[in-house]
Image (tube, rainbow, N blue to C red):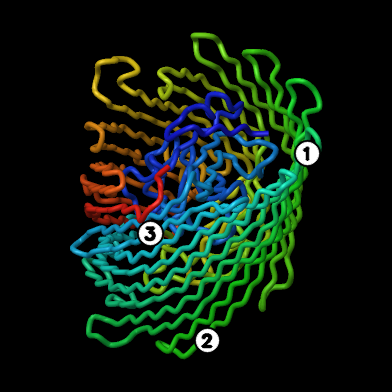
Amino acid sequence: MQRVAITGPGDTAQRQGDTAGTIVVARDELLQFGDGTLSGVLGRLPGLSVADGEIRMRGLGAGYTQVRVNGDPAPPGFSLDTLAPELVERIEIMRTTSAEYSAQAMAGSINIVLRKAVRGTRRDVKLGVARERNRWSPTATLQLADKHGDMAYVLAATLARTFYDSLPRVATDATAPNGTLLSRRRFDEDYHGRVDKASLAPRVTWTMANGDTLAWQSLIDIGRTATDGTSVETTLAGTPTRSPLSRFTASAEDDILRSDVNWSHRLGAARLTAKAGINSSRRRGDYRFTGSDLAGTPTMTRNVVSSARDDSAGSNGKLLMPLLPGHGVALGWDATYSRRRETRVQHDTAPADTVLDQDYTAGVTRLALFAQDEWDIGEHLQAYLGLRWEGLDSTTRGSTLAGVGTRASVWSPVLQALWKVPDRGQWRLAVARTYKAPLTRNLVPRRYTVNNDNSPGTPDIEGNPALRPELAWGVDGGWEAYFGGQGVVGVTGYARRISDVTVQRLFRDRDTWVSTLTNGGGATAHGIEFDAKVPLRSLLAAGPDLDLRVNASRNWSRVDAVPGPGNRLADQTPLTANLGADYRIGAAWSAGINYSYQGSSLSRRTPLLQAATGPVRTLDTYMAWNGGQHGKLRIGLVNLLRDARTDGQLYSGEDGATDRRTVTPTAATLRVQFDLPLGGPKR
């Protein structure tokens, strides 16, 4: 049983009273900077970072951080950026797991709660526009809410068109085993794209005469993407690649449907809740690559038609029973079946006419049973005991692959304790066993090919149907202090010991470099985090109406099978920090600023391949006007520092060395939003 008490934006009540210390980020805080995507919002929150569009806790993504939507694990193929922030009610950050939720949360979990009921009638339309690199990206959001007798509904819909540009500069060097320079090349790349999105999130709730509640909620997301790009190679030493001049065009159709029904029924002093839901996502892609030599003679023409379909269905529920005074005991289940099918037809017409036809299907069945007891031992001491059994059964088969299956089960005990010391803050301790199951797409042995300049730094990528789950024991501990109703200061630490860790395997298939994943021994991870939110008036009653925010996270990890230095786990981000302030200027105006920093990192992915990323510094600001029934205006300036993103890969082996370095310039973005109420009382 996880207690939820939301009383207002930025409220600390749930974190203070919850044994797990869940951090709740309310809707108003999510919308402060006018972000067009959730990834932009999450990068400012305590303990979180974003790398290559992937959300990370404790610097770890790639399946170590669990993302949930309305309490359920996000379906395969789900991307944070498919959700507009306007569709979200709040975000819950849990640094440790509980028996009720999936134990696939080694680094922690993020729960995205979609819009639910609001008080009274609501009719709002929000119009926005963003400008980056001289291109305008418009958005529109409609929100409707009302109540009729025992039925209440909320409907949120968004339309958006987003343009993006990328101008990376790539430099590569190749040397022989004796150090002789074999080649030196520079690539000037130019990519442009457009994404059209439409999202619809309805929710309907019925309250029945006997006190039962029935809720239906869905999310429909439709996306269309068009991209094109060019690459021009300059050869400074050695010979050019096969296609020093190249161009590609690509289009994709992405459709996502998520729908579930939730029922709550009281049985005397007990309560039964049950949920059943389906998820379906489809992606269809069309890709064309044309390469030529410096004289313009075609060297390669490739057409690829591909599709990926993820479908899943599941049910979960629990029976909550107050058996003894101070005890809240719950028993429950969680079952899901997911299936992924990929098809890919590649047709090369130059230098030779060849066809590659691939078709793979992977299925995963997951069943979990759990029991938990939240125990109020005394006035200042709370404890949580939980036990979860979770079984996984995966099977992969394809047109060129006989059926390959793996089966695993995990017992996950969970212990949490909260000790409140009057006037001296409170202490937390948690011990849990967690795991990381292979992503379904990593089980499919389909090969993703590189069109030009295949190398250890840019290899073809292939799935491995024999991947096994990673298992971990972990401990979390920390201290927190609360003041002034909204102020909080906290320090936490964590440690994990992982077995069957997933590592990268880099090998040569004739003249082609290929990368795949495999299980490779143990690993450790540990770190420390600090976060604080200080309303200045809680310290100085006559001070300005200013809230200060600061958080920082330092992370370390080591993979036993890979020699150091830099043998980090899954390219872990070593350091993240945020410093921000929000200032209310009278009753109508407010403004804010946030500085984010992600430290550079060196990661050794294999004994012969290492990767490096440079630091990322971001400065965002906003100003907002709240005119009540006259509307709201918000202006944001994002990425004012315009730091270029840098990364590189270095391979060094018996056959020589290759060095690849990429610098990608970035641009500032102007965002303007106007929120207009169409009638009805505001909440």
Q: Is 608 drawn above or below residue 253 in the view shown?
A: above
Q: Quadrant of residue 565?
A: top left
Between the C-alphas of marks 1 and 3, the distance is: 40 Å
Quarter holding the C terminus is: top left
| Res 651 seen here | no
Pointer 1 or 2: first along the chain: 1
Q: Is residue 168 visible?
A: yes
User: In the rendered structure, which amino acid carries the disc numbered 3?
Assistant: Thr
In the image, which is nearer the foreground, mark 1 or mark 3?
3
For the residue labelled by badge 2, is the local secondary structure a helix, a strand or a loop? Answer: strand
Task: Compare marks 1 and 3 and give the one earlier in the sequence.
Answer: 3
Identify the residue at image location x=62%, y=38%.
498
Label 3 – label 2 distance at C-alpha: 45 Å
Instruction: Name the amino acid, label 2.
Output: Val
Total numbered labels: 3
Q: Check disc 1 and report its element: helix, strand or loop.
A: strand
Question: Residue 141: which numbered mark, if any?
Answer: 3
Residue 60 x/y as whole percent: 49, 43
Instruction: Report, in whole angstroms, how far the alpha carbon at label 1 lies from the one at label 2.
Output: 54 Å
Q: Residue at x 46, y 73 (%)?
A: 253
The image shows residue 493, relative to residue 448, as above or below, that is: above
Position in image of residue 674 (x %, y %):
28, 53
Name the residue beneath numbered marker 2. 355
Q: Position of residue 598 (x, y in %)?
A: 35, 40
Mark 3 or mark 2, which has the lower sequence index?
A: 3
Q: Nearer the viewer, residue 86 or 335?
A: 86
Position of the N terminus by quadrant? top right
Residue at numbered disc 1: 331
569 or 513, nearer to the observer? 569
> How far across and how far down the image is residue 195, in percent?
37, 68
Element at label 3: strand
Query: What amino acid is at disc 1?
Result: Leu
